[in-house]
Structure formats: structure tokens, C-alpha cells
Image: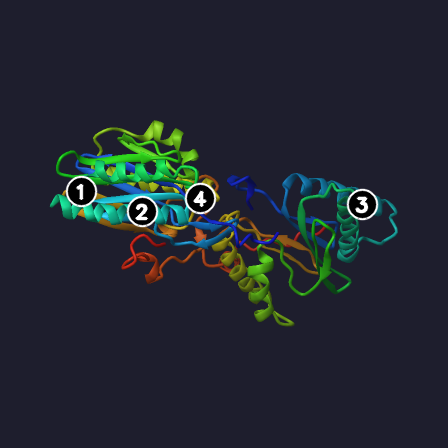
Amino acid sequence: MDPDLSAPHSMGTTIIGVTYDGGVVLGADSRTSTGMYVANRASDKITQLTDNVYVCRSGSAADSQILSDYVRYFLNQHTIQLGQPATVKVAANLVRLFSYQNKNMLQTGLIIGGWDKYEGGQIYSVPLGGTVLKQPFTIGGSGSSYLYGFFDQAWKDGMSKDEAEKLVVKAVSLAIARDGASGGVVRTVTINAEGATRNFYSGDSLPLWHEELEPRNSLLDILVSGASPEPMSI
Amino acid sequence: MAGSYGSTLRYKNVERIKSIGKHTLLGASGEVSDFQEILRYLDELIIYDDMWDDGNSLGPKEVHNYLTRVMYNRRNKFDPLFNSLVVGGVKNGQKYLGMVGMIGTHYEDNHVATGFGNHLARPLMRAEWHEDMSFEEAVKLLEKCLLVLLYRDRSAINKFQIAKITEVGVTISEPYALKTFWGFLAFQNPTKGAEGSW
């Protein structure tokens, strides 16, 4: 089974955006795949558009990159003309414009999250067709299928920054456990009045889920520690 | 130990290595239902051989050959068994290791692999395998390969079994997980200075 190395790079992905009391937390996994091969196991899918607005990218790596490049460029011009930071709403609608007008050619789902002085922390979902929806939280990417039930149960309004971040990390980690297209590390960006902070949760610091085992250095450590089974003979 | 369902990692406890008769180990990748069918075929083969009660028993070479015929004949009928198989064992002091693919491709070598292992593990084994390796060295080499495959194969999970077969008998380890490394500095902030890239 040859890896299809000419398959378009797709970020299978799990992406999440969550509002909390005072700002937003954006989260994503770090796996970029070409067919079944993991082309990049430590990608950064949370991209900066302005100082106060970031976007989580999913779907085609190329499409999402070029779209965010365009939006960053125009948002930059807009900020200069406006004389103050762009609002999250404007950023989200600019993303929508590109997504909707090129819907036949693009294959990317995005989550825009940021903070501005008018409306505080906001999350906007821009899925495949170019819809814009403002939401208290949203999930996206192939890994999100496994999280609908989880969020139905675990989401609550008015969380603190720490609660929100813990929720995002737990959710991405659960999706990684079940989605082959998601994996690697969990990256988060927290945005509030103070600015934006990046965080990094490496693979071995994430909790273990059902049927996952404690990692070890080698089988030899297990054997040496005395649990050496006798060979089966028939 | 993963059983995938499309891109979902559905089953996390699938035993892909089984012992066949007294002298052989069989490892399979691919469709689990087809592997289970192959185990039934082999079960019948071993039982019928045993019923002769002639002191003879099928070894790894025979099992490998039988599986090759099965896989190739199914391929000819355009109804393949979707598996790649690794057959290994020891009989009368002679070691044997071989591979059979779903279209009947087969060969024997000191180190074999299936799927992504062909691209990622075989170069490692070519470089580091040598005659008369100890068990510990062999395990370390295998684990090196398993780790690379865990990083780079989407259908892999962090749960492994290593099996050993010698003249004395068979040992299949309990499932265990390996430590992964994410501490490269470049992983921390890969897009610094190149916003919007990977």
C-alpha cells in the first residue's frame, strides 16, 4: 500500500473555539496528513490574523493558508485606514467573503476567535459553504465528529479562563484518541484584553483515555522488572 | 493493536499476532475479518495435519507456502483477502521469516514489514540488523521502527505487542505503550516569523 504522496495535504484536524468570561480560547491538534502519511506531526493550525484575532484552520492546508494570508493582508490595510484594531466581527466577515465567493474551489472550514473592546471575546464559525455564525463555542474538522456528545454534556456558560482552557485541551485530546486524521500535540491560543497567549501541550502530557496505556521506554523494562512470562509450549 | 473503521480508530485492542501450531507466529495487517478467516483456514490445516499423528508438524516454511497459495488464488478470482502477513518461526533449530501480500507477493528475509513499514521500517532494519543479534537488541530495533510508524502512520495507535518464537516456544507480550518525544525546540513555535505557514 503505497503512501499517496501526491495527495493534497489535508489537515484532517480537530479545531475548537470557546468563549469564556473575558475572552476566548482556541485549540487545535497538530497533524497534517498526505493520504495516510503524516506529513507534519507538529503543525501550527492556529494562525494570527491581527494582534487580537486568530483563526483555526481545517480541511485543505493550501486553501486555508492562502485564505488566511489574503484576510491578514486586507485586515492589515483596514486597521491602518480605521486607525484602531479591527473588530472580530469584521475579520470573520472578511473570511466569509472569501469562503463564500470561492466556494466552488475552496475546501476549508475555519473558526475565527478574538477579542475587541466593543463586544469582548467572540467566536465565529465559518464552515465549508461560507456561512458565518457567531457562537459561544464551536468545533470543527474531522475530529469534531467525536466531540458533539462531549460538548453537549460538558459545555457551560460563564467559565473561567482556566476552566475553558482545560476543557479545550481535554476535548482535543479525546478527539485525537479516536480520529486517525488528528494527532500530535495540542496547541491553544487564549485571547483577551491583555493580548494573546500561546500554549503547547505535548503528546505525553495529555491524559490517557479508554484502552490507552502508560507509555514506557521499552518492552525490556517491563520484562526486567520481573513480569517475564514462561514461553507457551503446546 | 488498532482496528480502524475508515479514519476512525474504532477498536483499540485487536490482537494481530497469533501462534500457529507449535512452530509458527503469524502477524497480519489490513482487514481484521479476513485475518480471522485466515486463522480458521490455518486451524483446519493444523488440525488435519495433527490427525495423521505421525510425529510430523507443519513449520513456518509450510505455513508461509500455504498462505501464499491461498492469497494468490484469491487474487486470481478477483476476490482478495485484504491482508499483508508476516510469517515467522523456528523448526528443528532453523529460523524462518517471510512475508505474503494480498496479491500473493511473497519473499523470505531476515527482516520483513507490511504497509508503511516497507517505507519507514525496512531502511532502519537494513542499516541496523546484523547476524546473531541478542533478543534485547532485536527488541530495541523493533521499537525504533514502531515509534517512527506511530509518528507517521495515521492508522497507528500507541499500543503494541512484541512476540518471540524460539525452539523452546512462543511468547506474546502483554500490550504496552511507548514514550513519544515532542521536545524539539522547533515544535514549540513553528510559525514564528512565518505567520500562516505550518
**Can you tell which quarter of the image residue B59 is in?**
bottom right
- Disc 4 marks a residue whose amino acid type is Gly
Label located before the other in sequence (2 or 4): 4
Tell me, yes or no, whether the two marked residues, 1 and 3, touch with CB atoms within 8 Å: no
Count neighbours of disc 4 (C-alpha within 10 A) and say few if under 14, some if 14 to 19, many if 20 or more.
many
- Identified at 42% across, 39% down, the residue is A143
**Which chain letter goes with mark 4?**
A
Mark 2 = which residue? A68
**Image quarter in which the C terminus of chain B is found:** bottom left
In space, the residues marked 2 and 3 are separated at their CA atoms by 61 Å
Can you tell which mark lies on residue A12?
4
| Helix, strand or loop for disc 3 | helix
Cα separation between marks 2 and 1: 15 Å
The numbered mark 3 sits on a residue in which chain?
A: B
Q: Give residue A195's mark.
A: none
| Marks 2 and 4 in Cβ contact (< 8 Å) | no
What secondary structure is marked by label 4? loop
Chain letter of mark 1 equals A
Q: Point out residue A26 in the picture as x, y percentages from the top left corner.
A: 28, 42
Q: Quadrant of residue A209?
A: top left
Tag nearer the camera, 1 or 4: 1
Give, as a three-letter code, the residue at label 1: Ala
Chain letter of the residue beneath label 2 in the structure image: A
Q: Which residue is mark 3?
A: B45
Mark 2 nearby-residue class (10 Å; few <14, some 14–19, many ≥20)? many
Under mark 3, the amino acid is: Leu
- Residue on which disc 1 sits: A86
Q: Are the two marked residues, 2 and 3, in contact with CB atoms closer than 8 angstroms?
A: no
Q: Amino acid at mark 2?
A: Ser
Q: Nearer the viewer, mark 2 or mark 4?
A: 2
- Number of the front mark, 1 or 3: 1
x then y, percent, for residue A42:
38, 54
